[in-house]
Amino acid sequence: MGLQCGIVGLPNVGKSTLFNAITSSNLAAAANYPFCTIEPNTGVVAVPDARLGVLTSIAIPDKEVPATIEFVDIAGLVKGAASGEGLGNQFLSHIRDVDAILHVVRCFDDNNIIHVDGSVNPVRDIEIIDSELIFKDIETVDKKIDGAARKAKTGDAKAKAEVDLYERVRTHLGEGKLARTFETINDDEILWMRDMHLITRKPVMYIANTDEAGIQNGNDYIKLVQEIATKEKANVVAICAKIESELAELPSDERAAFLQELGMKEPGLNVIVRSAYDLLGLQTYFTVGKQEVRAWTVRKGAKGPEAAGVIHTDFEKGFIRAEVMKYDDFVRLKTEAAMRDAGLLRSEGRDYTVQDGDIMHFRFNV
């Protein structure tokens, strides 16, 4: 679906190390000094889903294709970025282009790794990033107020309503509040808010980058991030980017033993990728055949035609019906014929709401 998660944070918090581990690459330079990353790096990552492997073992197709999500490593922001400090405006424009934000926060002590502000303080670090994003959003809202105010002078009633909304948003932001906590009151306001593409309206997940001890026992830094996230109704994933980087470099047959040694059930990166997928409001449906077993990405709440359109726009335009099987039933009965005989292969129309894990086959006519 082409959706992107932008990895943001202050310089030297582990963003590029995390990006390289997630994407199993060395695209992002990682070094012990600010602004190591200048241009954003992009990587496409498979969404971990054990169901795909199970379906492959049943169907034995020619190939297996996972769902994917795109990650963008954005250079570190500093205090004053919104007014041009560091390479602020350039970095902020990159954030504007992504669909969701993964905010990496340093939650470990290490005198050998420079902190841009001289000390480890997750609350301060989060406030710096939020403030810079808010300042940039205020610029956007001010421009909207100017444009709508000119229309309102002509007597345009809708423009007057727009001005009212923008001024309320401006006040909200001016109080240091994020746009995603602003409440709209009607459909017009929802549309105007969406059209502004405010950075602080994007969904956010906090990634608490800690050390090995923090992963195993937690620490006070992680607790502070969790407190902030709870107030914002955001998620927190605690990882050790250093461990994840080491794990990504190991041969696949050695990773299980490494995880067991650390007392981890799976790589933290798997949790991040799945959480990011959920953060974007996405879910998976499957197609199963001899040529391929594939996981497809569709938004939660999508109807049958929209899901068909993910495969090809012609499928959506000519949608007739979807033949749907539930994952658990298919795993138990193994074949489409057995599902049909058991009355568990259902024919669904245009109003069917796709469920996560559905196995679907579309009938269409163009």
Image (cartoon, helix red, strand yellow):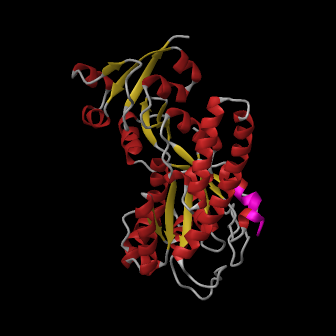
Residue 267 in sight from this viewpoint = no
Query: In which quarter of the view is residue 174 placed?
Result: bottom right
Front residue of 157/279: it is 157
Quadrant the N terminus occupies: top right
User: Which residues are the magenta region?
Assistant: 83-92
- Percent from the top left, x then y, of residue 198? 62, 49
Position of 272 with respect to 348 (left or right) is: right
Residue drawn at x 72%, y 74% is 34
Residue 356 vs 26, above or below: the answer is above
Q: Residue at x 76, y 69 (%)?
A: 85
Indicate whether residue 89 is drawn in magenta.
yes
Q: Is residue 50 left or right of residue 34?
A: left
Among all residues in the image, which is located at the extreme top?
Answer: 365
Q: Is residue 7 visible?
A: yes
Residue 357 forms part of the magenta stretch: no
Q: Residue at left 51%, top 50%?
A: 182
Query: In this image, 38 relative to 241: left or right?
Result: right
